[in-house]
Amino acid sequence: MRQITIYREPGRYAGWPANYGIWSWDNEIVVGFTVGYHKSDAGFHRRDRDKPFTAMQARSTDGGETWTVSETPCKLPGTGTLSANEHVQDKDKQQEDSSYLTPQTVNLEHPDFAMMCSRSGLKAGAQSWFYTSTDRCHSWQGPFQLPMFGYTGIAARTDYLITNSEKCLVFLTASKSDGGEGLVFCARTTDGGQTFSLHSQIGPEPEGFAIMPASVRLSESHILVAVRCRGKSDKTGKNWETLLNWIDLYASDDDGKTWNYMNRPVEDTGRGGNPPTLTRLHDGRLCLIYGYRDAPHRICAKLSNDNGNTWEDEIVLRDNGGDPDIGYPRTILRPDGVVVTVYYFDEEPDGERFIEATLWKP
């Protein structure tokens, strides 16, 4: 198990790969994240809300051993920041000017294809859009607007399963009926990304939230989705710090048309919670990875050898986090079976937040 630093600069705040995405082609890997500025007294996320965040992507051509970092080469539907409005003041928020492009059919099975989903917010009124690339993220076409699918807001991150050259399932988060975040659902395109329609909602509308789905396909019809969840604890008050956070697992046996609750692979992800990644290994086992935000602050994994019906004990990938502000992982599987997990991390409470990768073989 090895730790590789992807981006780390004094005084800077780098975070949240799960908000952007990860893509791979054999040993070439690209991961997205965002970079702002550190501020000691800014609360849970020690970032300076008075300064802008810049969307970045890192590329490795040797399976995650070494990385180069550059700005994400994509155009916003307006001005501001990419998927980071909640972390900046109004002057730096993403302001839409309706400059969305009209999507054209793209070959979803193009050997160098990638899709990235983005959002303007988290609650009612949030709009989302997507980009496509056919040159391994060297350029992004878009932005192309996603519909509202009948919900009050769409807070998209990147998670999709390609069926063929024209069909794809996209897993998204929507605002609840009261305008808060959120619930998860599945959308579908059958024309190479020109149009999207609501395919199904995954689980009932929660009392707390269910957000940031992570999907894996087990067969032509069988799909699993892990979901970041939050709900009430037995503590009094409504402060988010008193709430419980966990990860639930849902299954579909009809290619995402209907869903059944399976189990809770992770009972607790700590203060604030953390999203999952879900990966099928070459030997058929499932690998679930997440951040744990209580002490000892760490990045964790769990394995299942029966398609998610049961889960083995937690494996600690890294355990020297300085405070709860860590995690948001994205994961790919190399051809040689090595798992590459990228996340943001810190080593001391008032230190810079940086982007790290753990390379390991389950």
Image (spheres, helix red, strand yellow):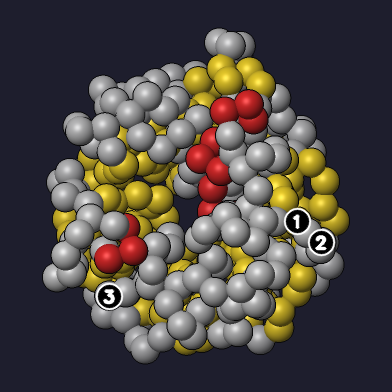
Q: Quadrant of residue 40?
A: bottom right
Q: Which residue is rendered at x = 40% and y = 50% of the image?
A: 212
Q: Which residue is rendered at x = 81% and y = 63% of the image?
A: 10
- Above or below, 166 against 255 in this view is above
Q: Residues within 10 Å of mark 3 (few under 14, many from 20)?
A: few
> Mark 2 vs mark 3: which is more N-terminal?
2
Q: Secondary structure at mark 3?
A: loop
- Give x and y (percent) for residue 213: 38, 52
On screen, residue 101 versus residue 207, left or right, reads: right
Residues tagged 2 and 1 counted as in contact (Cβ below 8 A): yes
Residue 92 is at least partly visible in this image: yes
Q: Which mark is residue 267?
A: 3
Q: Residues within 10 Å of mark 1 (few under 14, many from 20)?
A: many
- Give x and y (percent) for residue 229: 29, 58
- Above or below, 302 against 325 in this view is below
Q: Nearer the viewer, mark 3 or mark 1?
A: 1
Quarter of the figure that contains the N terminus:
bottom right
3D distance between C-alphas at marks 3 and 1:
33 Å
| Residue located beneath label 1 in the image | 12
3D distance between C-alphas at marks 2 and 3:
34 Å
Q: Amino acid at mark 1?
A: Arg
Q: Which mark is residue 9?
A: 2
Q: Which residue is rendered at x = 57% and y = 28% of the image?
A: 90
On screen, residue 97 versus residue 61, left or right, reads: left
- Give x and y (percent) for residue 226: 34, 60
> Mark 3 vs mark 1: which is more N-terminal?
1
Q: Residues within 10 Å of mark 2 (few under 14, many from 20)?
A: few
- Above or below, 259 against 350 in this view is above
- Above or below, 158 against 230 in this view is above
